[in-house]
Image (cartoon, rainbow, N blue to C red):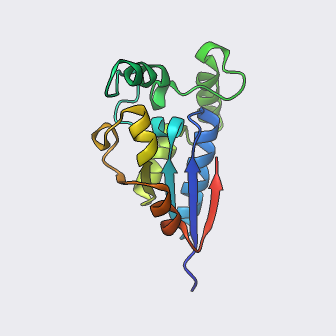
Amino acid sequence: MENKKLSLIAFSGDFDKLTAVFTLATGAAAVGYDVNIFFTFWGLDAIKKKTGRAWLGSNWLTKTFGFMMGGLSNTPTSRFNFLGIGPKIFRYLMRKNNVATLEELVDAANALGVNLYACEMAMHVLGLEKDDFIPEVKDVLGVASFLNLSEGGRTLFI
């Protein structure tokens, strides 16, 4: 049987886009795909240890960015955010309709062995260290390493 592989590039830190990333990742992993997610720039919020607002960074400017980004529990929706109420409405609707929430999808991805990687360049720009991320992050990679890792499979940019 051919090894099926899906690699996702999570660029966005928006609730709905991260939900799409983790829905695709968990669905593919559940049916036997080898799944890699490469988190870069705003997407790095999904894998931070601190899920709320935190002053993460190496200087005042990157710490301000870290605080404004807000972590997984403060991700905005890409449309109809309504000053932060949008994600709360989505979480309510997801629970009401027996759909996994973003946080549950992240847990499922970890349980299913989805490979999580952080972008080295984006981490440098944002003043982040590997210790700022959840322990399930397998490694910090540059673009060339991620391209080698994802070779032979499908790659999606979200």
Return the residue found at the far right. Answer: 80
Residue drawn where x is 44% and y is 45% of the image: 121
Residue 109 shows up from this direction: yes
Res. 98 visible in picture: no
Image quarter of residue 30: bottom right
**Residue 3 placement, left or right of 131:** right
Which of the 4 image quadrants contains residue 27?
bottom right
98 relative to 40 in the view: left or right: right
Residue furthest to the bottom: 1
Location of residue 142 in the rendering, given as x and y in whole percent from the top left corner: 44, 55
155, 91: nearer the viewer: 155
Name the spot of residue 92 as percent of width and height, x first. Answer: 60, 27
Q: Taking 29 as reference, is 45 above or below it?
A: above
Residue in the foreground of this view, choosing between 16 and 156: 156
Quadrant in the picture for the N terminus: bottom right
Q: Which residue does the image show at 31% across and 44% down from the upper left? A: 130
Q: Is residue 66 above or below residue 33?
A: above
Horizontal and vertical percent for residue 149?
A: 48, 67
Residue 137 image point, x, y percent: 36, 50
Q: Going 63% across and 32% down the picture, which residue do you hit?
A: 96
Number of residue marks: 0
- Between 144 and 54, the residue placed more toward the observer is 144
